[in-house]
Amino acid sequence: MAKRLLPIGIDDMAFYVPKLYLDIHALAEKRNISYEKLSQGLGLFKMAICDVHEDAATMAAEAIAELIERNQLDPRRIGRIYLGTESALDGAKPTGTYAVEMLGQRFAARYGPDCFRHCDVVDMTFACIGATDALHNTLDWVAADGDNIGIVVASDVAKYELGSSGEYTQGAGAVAMLVRRNPRLLAVRNLFGVAMESVHDFYKPRRERFTETPVFDGQYSNQCYQNRMTEALADFRRRAIAGGVFRNDQYLALSERWARMIFHLPYAFHAKRMYVEQFVTERKAKGNWAADVQRFGFNEPASDAFSDRKSFEKAQAVFFKTVSESSLYRRFVSEKLEKAQRASQDTGNLYTASIFLALMSTLEIDGAEGARLAGKKLGFIAYGSGSKAKVFEAVVQPGWAEIAAKFKVFEKLQQRRAIDYDQYENLHTGEQQGSVLAEMGHWGLKEIGKEGVTLGARYYASF
């Protein structure tokens, strides 16, 4: 009898968030924006802010260290640490190498100074989908050899120009994932729907003056997200049918296949805004739309009834808003999407880490509520500007709740310190002299080389 292969997936996860945050009230008041527009319209309450000594490398190191400590991992057994980020600290040297250097400092006494010597380290960049790419790659690597153990980490600082339309979505944080065979949390199926098109919705071009902030077009980026998501969902469905995962007529609505849906969230309410159009398409495919129209009075505009495209799109936006406010759609959001929003509301956008924080938020809340998710499927919709979407699914494992109970996502969010607007602006512009809150035992940037062969080199140490 052929030996049954064990599943591959995410065994455990760890989350790090900076200890500082700005209340959205403070930003709304300073920018003369309605607080309700940000809180009730976008789901924004708090913005995670990096201190002077923090960056993508320190946050990655903190998340990985927690994962190693909790699981009592011998670093010499970790075959790779792949970092997904768009907040790289260097144009050539991977940010992940700085994180592993810090880890080596911490674990040298227990496991030797060379305990990470044979660990493969690399950065993967494709805007907000980079860590999903790193996970996809690492799953294949573990599948090739069941003895392989890898860590995928997503770490980013979402930073925009002061006063820009993206400013209020800023955030920062890191999520680390232990990837191995026979995982205790999620088994990830080797089935990915993909859609890619080279566009300029959001990017960070080379400029004469270095800047961490992007060039972006918010409306265009939303449309690119919508298009790539729709295409990737179709590709996932096509591949699933071709592979015999399900019949052509079995899941006309993929959202019905998935107990929860985990999206990349540039802001907390993004998923529920993005999925309305797809939701209507699914209701039509299942033959439910006529009854929905009769019950809820939906009035979908026809393009040929308008003399110009702009007028039609305006009417269409009103139509989709009406659907989104219906009890039909609100019930869908409550069941499939809402739990993923809660952590995002108190952090802002984490770029590559956003989708994985949404996962941790969902599982921690479901575990606390006693939800019966074992054996059920979760659907993932990842997006990276530039642009690419990936759709995949995972099966929740029997011991998931015990693992999720150790995430402590909301406990960590409650243990932060609020800063005022002036402190925020000083941190944003680099005017802040010295750390606001340097915690003992945590890593920080010690200095940056200023001349010769050390020019720009970054040096880290524990406080």
Image: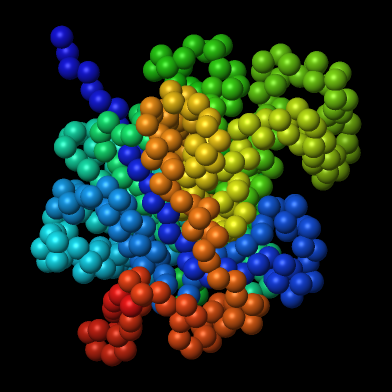
Q: Taking 354 as reference, is 275 above or below it?
A: above
Looking at the image, which residue is at 38% across and 29% down?
397
Please tell me in which quadrant of the rendered image residue 53 appears. bottom left
Q: Position of residue 280 (x, y in %)?
A: 71, 27
Answer with left or right where residue 216 lies relative to residue 77.
Answer: right
Q: Taking 294 as reference, is 255 above or below it?
A: below
Please tell me in which quadrant of the rendered image residue 137 appears. top left
Residue 9 in sight here: no
Foreground of the two, 280 or 68: 68
Answer with left or right where residue 335 lies relative to residue 108.
Answer: right
Foreground of the two, 89 or 260: 260
Residue 78 in sight here: yes
Looking at the image, which residue is at 48% across and 66% down?
18
Q: Position of residue 141 (x, y in %)?
A: 24, 39
Answer with left or right where residue 45 lies relative to residue 433.
Answer: right
Foreground of the two, 362 or 337: 362
Foreground of the two, 267 or 103: 103
Question: By what rule are the colours in the image chosen?
Answer: rainbow
Looking at the image, which residue is at 19% across and 40% down?
148
Q: Quadrant of the N terminus?
A: top left
